Amino acid sequence: MSNILIKPLITEKMSSDSEANNRFGFIVARDANKIEIRKAVESKYNVQVTSVRTINVDGKKKSRFTKTGMVNGRTNAFKKAIVSVADGQTIDFYDNI
């Protein structure tokens, strides 16, 4: 279960979504399914998950000009999960800093 959740998504958009709609974002393993994500979040953060949405994000093409010429590459692909928790419950990502 510990290798399913890679890291939480802490962005301005996800912060506003968590305050308004009680939804939290995570970057998860690419082969994880919704049931595994639900169990991992419930066991790690002691909350009741109501729904899980997943998004596969493709890597972007990147290029830069260096002394030796153009260098082309791609960023890594990853999978996002947006987890809704029950009303009255919340996940605090900053409690163990």
Image (cartoon, helix red, strand yellow):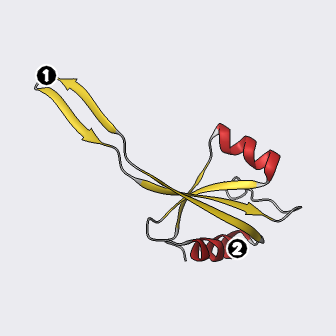
| Residue 92 percent location from the top left of the image | 74, 56
Question: What residue is pinned by disc 1?
Answer: 67
The residue located at (21%, 35%) in the rendering is 72
The residue located at (80%, 46%) in the rendering is 19
Q: CA distance from mark 1 to mark 2?
A: 50 Å
Residue type indicated by callout 1: Lys
Question: What residue is pinned by disc 2?
Answer: 42
Along the line of sight, which residue is nearer the eye, 55 or 49? 55
| Residue 51 percent location from the top left of the image | 71, 66
| Residue 41 percent location from the top left of the image | 66, 70
Specify the quadrant that holds the N terminus.
Answer: bottom right
Q: Quadrant of the rendered structure where residue 34 is? A: bottom right
Q: Quadrant of the rendered structure where residue 97 is? A: bottom right
- In terms of sequence position, does the residue under pointer 1 or pointer 2 come before the other? 2
**Looking at this rendering, what residue extends furthest in the right direction?**
88
Numbered label attached to residue 23: none
2 relative to 89 in the view: left or right: left
> Dot 2, how many residues are within 10 Å of its Cα: few (below 14), some (14-19), or many (20+)?
some
Give the answer, above or below, for where 64 lies relative to 27. Answer: above
Residue type indicated by callout 2: Glu
**Looking at this rendering, what residue extends furthest in the left direction?**
68
Along the line of sight, which residue is nearer the eye, 45 or 30? 30
Secondary element under disc 1, as helix, strand or loop, is loop
Mark 1 and 2 residues: CB-CB less than 8 Å, in contact?
Answer: no
